[in-house]
Image (cartoon, rainbow, N blue to C red):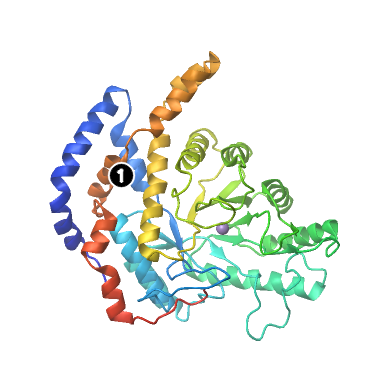
Amino acid sequence: MIIDKDTIEQYNKSEAEHFHSDFGFLSDKLTKSGANVSGIVSKISGFQVAVPSWALGAGGTRFGRFSYGGEPVTLEQKLDDVGLIHALTHSAGAVSLHIPWDIPGDVKAIKEKAAFHGLVFDAMNSNTFQDQPGAKQSYKFGSLNAANEDARAYAVEHNREVIRIGKELGSKSLTVWLADGASFPGQLNFQAALSNTEQSLKEIYAGMPEDWKLFIEYKPYEPNFYSTTIQDWGTAFMLANACGERAYTLVDLGHHLPNSNIEQIVATLMYKGKLGGFHFNDSKYGDDDLTVGSIKPYALFLIFNELVYGMENNPQNPYPAWMIDASHNIKDPLEDLIQSLEAILIAYAQALLVDQKALKDAQLDNDVVRCQEILQNAYRTDVRPLLKAARWQTGAALDPIAAYRNLKVRENLISERGLNTKATGL
Ligand SMILES: [Mn+2]
């Protein structure tokens, strides 16, 4: 199924009147308070978030997985699904591939398909957390950190292969997330594991093209439950520094212990110019991989407040690579991703509304009450008309979820692909 511009334009007509009146009201109000409304709208429309190739089918837990009808089976179909989301939102203009789940068979055809949908290839993701059929080494006891030298070399070579595939597609970065760690005390020598990881990452980094970036992701636990070799931002930061200038830390919102101050981690990394990648999701207890903004929208806003500050004040930090890293267990994956995009853009728009000058003055005056008022004034603004204005300008659907349902996208995908399809890799 392909959604063309005319279909969306036609659909938008039914919502146009409401939109214009809501936007007019908000725009007047914000302009009176000194906000640059057109500047904010154009920033919102420019904000693009990558969708990972593994997010388009039903996810699952270790207890079970419930399939969704019409799931994409091939990489081509996955690109078509991202294309549908992008057509409806104009906010998902990139795809992040996972190797080996999505090795392109015909690179030229895949590139053409992506270009047709207006998609670019964002960071490539390697996989050394599971053994593939016919694997010559096992990652059961680690990959880049493994005590076994042959397993380490095998994992390094896999990452080089991912880089080779990414180069052909036009990607410019590699994300490394490791499951490496120990489930029991005594299983690993912490220092040897860290040293092996550092050495392996340096070898991967040395094999990257000059214009590539390496993103190092951290996670405090799971699938190993006693220790994780790259457990926190400090370890990832240290390893990125050891590799070199083009190695960065990647923050995944779910990869923190409960109540971690993620906004402060973001600020620290941007101050040092080392926040390279960012994975969005939400959680209540651990790495729950829930829809962005579904549990802690205020925390998301505070994080975006630091991201916006960093993007405006830290030229030493590159523009981060944004990606949604969630799992869709009970919702239609495409609807879930659209909800996540909405939450991301709401938090971004709210953060753009923070009166930075007034906040700085209030901080200088040690006026703590005023500081909170300024932040919450932005947070409590219903910015959805600004998102709609961005979509109106770019030709996306004013209400993407409603359009998705109205156009019966899932029903169409089921009739095209069948009810019993299963996305690869999950
Ligand atoms: Mn992640």
Could you tell me residue 298's position as x and y percent? 47, 39
Disc 1: which residue: 387
- For residue 390, which quarter of the picture? top left
- For residue 269, which quarter of the picture? top right
Is 331 on the left or on the right of 148, as rendered?
left
Could you tell me residue 23's position as x and y percent? 22, 37
Which quarter holds ligand 1? bottom right
Q: Is residue 120 above or below residue 48?
A: below
Residue type (three-letter) at the residue carrying disc 1 = Leu
Q: Residue at the top extreme? A: 365
Q: Is residue 297 above or below residue 152?
A: above
Could you tell me residue 360's position as x and y percent? 50, 21
**Helix, strand or loop at disc 1?**
helix
Q: Is residue 413 above or below residue 275?
A: below
- Asked if one can make out residue 276 in the rendered structure from this viewpoint, the answer is yes
| Crowding near the residue tagged with mark 1, few <14, some 14–19, many ≥20 C-alpha atoms within 10 Å | many
| Residue at image location 47% in from the left, 19% down from the top | 370
| Residue at image location 32% in from the left, 37% down from the top | 382
| Residue at image location 29% in from the left, 40% down from the top | 386
Is 42 on the left or on the right of 137, as rendered?
left
